[in-house]
Amino acid sequence: MSSSPSPTTALLLIAHGSRRREANEDLSFLAEQLQREGPYPVVQISYLELSEPTIGHAGAECVAQGARRVILLPYFLSAGVHVREDLADARLELAKRFPEVEFLLAEPLGRHPLLQEVVLQRASETLKGY
């Protein structure tokens, strides 16, 4: 008896968004790296406000590319109002719009242990410049 293939899982990165193009390019860079090196066949970017694509548009693009499960990953440092309320609402809206697709909201980056290493590395890089 053969098992059915696992659903295609997409990764939807969500940043706050900025009017400055350069600030938004960090998320695009990360998405390109993850698409090239990561396990997810679909990686999309989106912004909560001030920039495009919106979460709804990018979520729809994940579905259009065949995703049956979408992980909404907040590119935020803490679980403030945006993550706990705005992104939770966006997840619910996508789930209603695409009931055949599972939408999951990940935790923000803030308390992940590897973030401490990144902070210390950035501090060390700064000292090397003086």
Image: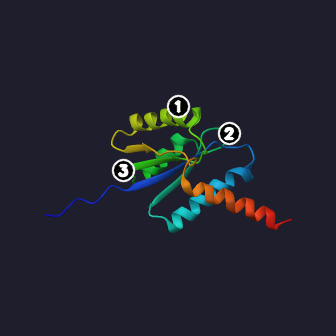
Please tell me whether mark 1 sits on a helix, a strand or a loop: helix
Q: Residues within 10 Å of mark 1 (few under 14, many from 20)?
A: few
Between marks 1 and 2 in the image, the one whose residue lies nearer the viewer: 1
- Residue 8 on image: x %, y %: 37, 56
Residue 85's tag is 1
- Residue 33 on image: x %, y %: 57, 64
The residue singled out by tag 2 in the image is 50
The disc, 2 or 3, on the residue closer to the chain's N-terminal end is 2
Gap between marks 1 and 2 measured at Cα: 18 Å
Which kind of residue does numbered mark 3 sit on? Answer: Arg
Which kind of residue does numbered mark 1 sit on? Answer: Glu
The disc, 1 or 2, on the residue closer to the chain's N-terminal end is 2
Q: Name the residue: 54% across, 33% down.
A: 86
Q: How is the image coloured?
A: rainbow
Q: Check contact, mark 1 vs mark 3: CB within 8 A.
A: no
Instruction: Quadrant for the C terminus, please.
Output: bottom right
* Residue 19 relative to residue 129: left or right: left
Gap between marks 2 and 3 measured at Cα: 28 Å
